[in-house]
Amino acid sequence: MKTTTIKFGLNPWLTLWEQALERVLLDDDGKILKFNTGALLHGSLKDQAEYFSKALGAGGTQPWLTQNEVRRTCDLPRSKDKDADSLKNPMTSKQMDKRGKQNELD
C-alpha cells in the first residue's frame, strides 16, 4: 500500500474512528486507542524477521538496534529486561554501548 494512500485516504477516517471509539469505549484514565497504519507499510513477516535479526546482531553482524528499539518499531511495549537498551556483541558474551565499546556482562 502506498504512503499517499494511507496519508490522504485512510488517516482522516482512522482519526475519526479513533476519536469516536475513545469517546464511547474508554474512560478518562489515560488509555488511548490507535490504529497502526505503519504495519500496512511493513514487508512480509519473513522479511521483517530477517531484518530485525540482523539489526540485533545475528549471524555475526554488528548490531545497530537494541531490543527496545525493535519493539518500538513494532509498536510493542518496552521490555523490562535491564539489558534491552544495550547493543550486544554477537561474537562474545559482552555488551556494547552505543559507541561500540564493550562492557562485561554481569
Image (cartoon, rainbow, N blue to C red):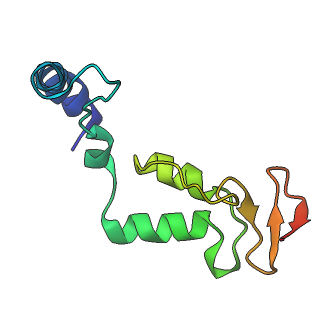
Q: Quadrant of the N terminus?
A: top left
The structure residue drawn at horizontal position 18% and vertical position 25%, both measured from the top left corner, is 18
**15 is higher (above) or lower (below) than 61:** above
The number of callouts visible is: 0
89 or 43, nearer to the observer: 89
Residue 96, image x, y percentages: 82, 61
The structure residue drawn at horizontal position 14% and vertical position 18%, both measured from the top left corner, is 23
The structure residue drawn at horizontal position 58% and vertical position 69%, both measured from the top left corner, is 54
Residue 103, image x, y percentages: 89, 64
Residue 67, image x, y percentages: 59, 58
Residue 97 placement, left or right of 78 = right
- Tell me the quarter of the picture where residue 19 sits: top left
6 or 93, nearer to the observer: 93
Residue 36 placement, left or right of 67 = left
Residue 56, image x, y percentages: 62, 66
**15 is higher (above) or lower (below) than 78:** above
55 or 83, nearer to the observer: 83
Q: Quadrant of the C terminus?
A: bottom right
Residue 44 placement, left or right of 70 = left
- Tell me the quarter of the picture where residue 101 sits: bottom right
- Tell me the quarter of the picture where residue 30 sits: top left
The structure residue drawn at horizontal position 12% and vertical position 26%, both measured from the top left corner, is 21
